[in-house]
């Protein structure tokens, strides 16, 4: 029985990561799981990588995301803005930091829970889980009762009932969703460092395996400071606007 | 392999006793557990071979909602079973029968009907405050504790403001129990707490008359009729019923939820203040509407899809329609304070136009002995206070259904105000406080006691105090002037 803090898509946003970790300190969490995309887009890749490395040393589960993978091997499928941000990121990471990112696993399992960055069916293909249709392959491929992923930057939750029918379910921020055992569940955790659901606050979630509940949280952070750093670094303006609007 | 329940079965430490109830969707068993001393029951959904969607989803909804509910109006959940072996919910057992048996004695005497209606409406508001709309209220789903509290069971169709609604997309047919289902539920709207108020109206109607307001339709077509066909007025069946009770019942049974009570607390309030129920044409109605009226209604309703934008959720609906208690001190030296209080009420009414305003004045009586109920001049104190209260509120320009006036009496005014707030599920108390003098601080004031002990928000209004310059430092003042 444990309380997992689920963080994903930090995207080198130091201000957001610090705010989330501060918020976590006020809630009980036994274990942190970082579901990938530690770097990319943001202005603090080195600091964020070191911080996540510290979390890993303290026992956190840390997975690899597509941006982390693209530090090592450029990804042809990425859009121009993401590629530009990664080109900016690469020289700012030390060899040790790059080695840490390169060594991260794609997926992890604990008890009846599977953690993954993107879709659980082919984690290395970085498939987006954006609806009932794209959620189904994860349920089909995974044996876990609860699957947790990121990558989409928009929080969502899907249930899969005994007839394998997948349904998107409503979530209310800060209100626990009971993951009743007659169904399997797929939680898409919102982004710490670059939310895209219209809410600019940093997103994360807590899974409590004792009460069997998943709770989505939002935390306000100094996004003006994070956006100012992006601009000062000469990163694409669209990335700064994204932080400010959360879209 | 799934286990099926039977007497003597042992599962997760529970031992099944006799089967207490065998319904269409579930069986209820008397169970014991060595670690639990209270009486327990186990509800096991009857899952036929293969996938039985309505039973399973209803049971899943119960498993989500019931463990989150607290208080005397719901059975306390003790344990839940896994679907892989045998799905079940174990709760405390509420001794006694459901209201089904009680309702067989209908029509009941008027005061019995009213006292039961008060208990149901109060319990329902407590449930709504926990963000749950029941959506299947009927005599079979209501029980009563030995201590008198109404208990709701069967949350298989319920909806919780903050939880996934597993039933929302599940069924294309409306769900509920036909005699009690609200018109908007027939239209597949399941997020309006006023649907529960409709069901309570139907139950009170039945208990007061011995008949169900819409009969016992067997088909959806039969349910649909209530969109235009009004029930026979209860007084036409039971002439003993007072007009005010008919007013309350028929208001709860209005087709358009906007014409009903906007919260169970507002219904409770009317049930507890019969003399102040605003009587409309509903109270005097002697027969069901004639054919042309019903036909016109049918014409209007034949393509209706809903009734205005539904409330966002139970909480939003309750916040829109709060009960505001205003405790007014009418003594002459408090005139200015009463004026400030009036301004505050006006401001609140602007943001909460559906607020119900309960104006209260307290007559403080001696702790011991009997107080004369008339003052020195022989004028009934109650009447004069009531007149004063009405005069105070006149500029609020509230209609009779928006405001009530009550004179409370007791040795401890704060306790009277708090007691009134508890009994009427008041959401917000507004009251004045005299200036802060050292004696008041020492003795304690009515307002501070109310703030400390009230079960709801309290706003204390004060007349602003302007510091009068003291005369001790004339030189300093001169120095500044110079």
Image: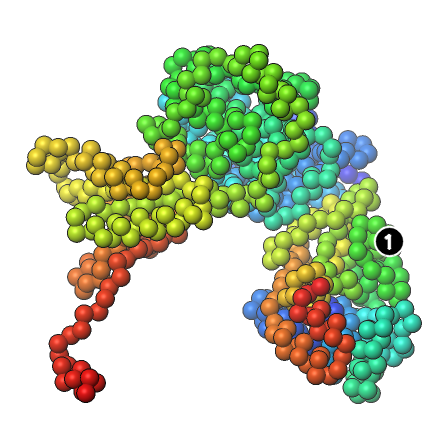
Position of residue B415 measured from the top left corner of the image (x, y, whole percent): 28, 46
Q: Is residue B92 visible from the viewing direction of this image?
A: no
In percent of the image, x 71 and y 49: which residue is there?
Answer: A169
In percent of the image, x 73 and y 60: which residue is there?
Answer: A154
Secondary element under disc 1, as helix, strand or loop, is: helix
Using a 10 Å C-alpha cutoff, classify the residue at mark 1 as few (fewer than 14 neighbours), some (14 to 19) or many (20 or more).
some
Determine the residue located farthest toward the left in the rendered image. B376
Q: Label 1 lies in what chain?
A: A
Q: Is residue A59 above or below residue B203?
A: below
Q: Is residue B352 left or right of residue A32?
A: left
- Observer-nearest of A45 and A42: A42
Q: Is residue B190 visible from the viewing direction of this image?
A: yes
Q: Is residue B131 left or right of residue A11?
A: left
Position of residue A6 measured from the top left corner of the image (x, y, whole percent): 70, 65
In percent of the image, x 78 and y 64: which residue is there?
Answer: A151
In the figure, residue B408 lies in which quadrant? top left
Q: Quadrant of the C terminus of chain B?
A: bottom left
Position of residue B116 measured from the top left corner of the image (x, y, whole percent): 43, 27
- Observer-nearest of A49 and B53: A49
Q: Is residue B249 above or below residue B431?
A: above
In the figure, residue A207 lies in which quadrant? bottom right
Q: Which residue is mark 1?
A: A137
């Amino acid at each position: 029985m444990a309380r997992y803090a689920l963080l994903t898509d930090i995207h080198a946003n130091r201000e957001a990561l610090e705010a989330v970790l501060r918020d976590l300190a006020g809630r009980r969490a036994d274990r942190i799981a970082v579901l990938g995309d530690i770097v990319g887009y943001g202005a603090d890749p080195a600091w964020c990588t070191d911080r996540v490395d510290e979390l890993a040393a303290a026992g956190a589960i840390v997975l690899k995301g597509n941006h982390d993978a693209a530090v090592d091997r450029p990804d042809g499928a990425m859009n121009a803005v993401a590629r530009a941000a990664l080109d900016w990121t690469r020289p700012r990471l030390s060899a040790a930091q790059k080695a840490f990112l390169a060594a991260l696993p794609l997926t992890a399992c604990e008890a009846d829970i599977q953690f993954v960055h993107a879709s659980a069916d082919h984690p290395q293909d970085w498939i987006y889980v954006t609806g009932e249709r794209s959620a189904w392959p994860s349920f089909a491929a995974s044996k876990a009762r609860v699957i947790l992923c990121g990558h989409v930057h928009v929080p969502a939750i899907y249930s899969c009932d005994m007839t394998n029918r997948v349904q998107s379910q409503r979530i209310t921020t800060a209100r626990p969703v009971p993951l009743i055992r007659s169904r399997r569940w797929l939680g898409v955790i919102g982004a710490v460092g670059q939310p895209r659901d219209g809410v600019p606050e940093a997103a994360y979630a807590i899974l409590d395996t004792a009460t069997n509940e998943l709770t989505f949280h939002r935390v306000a952070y100094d996004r003006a400071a994070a956006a100012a750093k992006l601009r000062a670094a000469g990163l694409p303006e669209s990335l700064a606007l994204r932080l400010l609007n959360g879209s | 392999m799934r286990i099926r329940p039977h007497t003597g079965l042992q599962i997760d430490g529970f031992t099944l006793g006799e089967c207490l109830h065998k319904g269409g969707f579930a069986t209820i068993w008397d169970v014991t557990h060595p670690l639990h001393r209270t009486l327990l029951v186990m509800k096991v959904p009857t899952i036929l071979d293969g996938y039985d969607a309505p039973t399973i989803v209803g049971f899943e909804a119960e498993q989500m909602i019931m463990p989150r509910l607290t208080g005397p109006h719901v059975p306390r959940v003790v344990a839940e079973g896994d679907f892989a072996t045998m799905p079940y919910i174990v709760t405390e057992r509420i001794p006694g029968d459901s209201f089904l048996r009680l309702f067989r004695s209908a029509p009941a005497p008027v005061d019995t009907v009213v006292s039961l209606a008060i208990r149901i409406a109060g319990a329902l508001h407590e449930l709504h405050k926990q963000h749950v709309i029941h959506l299947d209220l009927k005599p079979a789903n209501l029980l009563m504790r030995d201590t008198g509290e109404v208990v709701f069971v069967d949350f298989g169709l319920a909806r919780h403001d903050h939880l996934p609604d597993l039933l929302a997309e599940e069924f294309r047919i409306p769900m509920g129990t036909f005699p009690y289902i609200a018109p908007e539920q027939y239209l597949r709207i399941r997020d309006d707490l006023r649907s529960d108020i409709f069901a309570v109206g139907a139950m009170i109607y039945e208990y007061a008359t011995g008949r169900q307001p819409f009969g016992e339709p067997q088909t959806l077509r039969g349910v649909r009729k209530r969109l235009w066909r009004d029930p026979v007025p209860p007084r036409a069946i039971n002439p003993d019923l007072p007009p005010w009770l008919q007013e309350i019942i028929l208001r709860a049974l209005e087709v358009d939820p906007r014409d009903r009570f906007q919260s169970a607390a507002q219904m409770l309030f009317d049930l507890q203040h019969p003399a102040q129920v605003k009587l409309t044409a509903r109270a005097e109605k002697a027969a069901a509407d004639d054919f042309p009226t019903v036909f016109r209604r049918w014409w209007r309703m034949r393509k209706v899809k809903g009734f205005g934008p539904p409330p966002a959720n139970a909480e939003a609906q309750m916040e829109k329609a709060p009960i505001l208690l205003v405790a007014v001190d009418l003594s002459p030296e408090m005139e200015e304070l009463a004026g400030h209080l009036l301004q505050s009420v006006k401001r609140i009414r602007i943001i909460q136009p559906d607020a119900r305003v309960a104006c209260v004045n307290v007559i403080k009586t001696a702790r011991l002995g009997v107080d004369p109920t008339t003052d020195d001049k022989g004028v009934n104190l109650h009447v004069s206070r009531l007149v004063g209260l009405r005069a105070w509120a006149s500029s609020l320009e509230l209609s009779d259904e928006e405001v009530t006036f009550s004179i409370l009496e007791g040795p401890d005014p704060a306790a009277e105000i708090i007691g009134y707030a508890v009994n009427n599920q008041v959401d917000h108390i507004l009251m004045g406080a005299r200036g802060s003098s050292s004696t008041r601080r020492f003795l304690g004031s009515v307002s501070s006691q109310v703030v400390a002990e009230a079960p709801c928000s309290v706003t204390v209004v004060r007349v602003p105090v302007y510091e009068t310059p003291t005369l001790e430092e004339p030189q300093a003042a001169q120095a500044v002037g110079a």
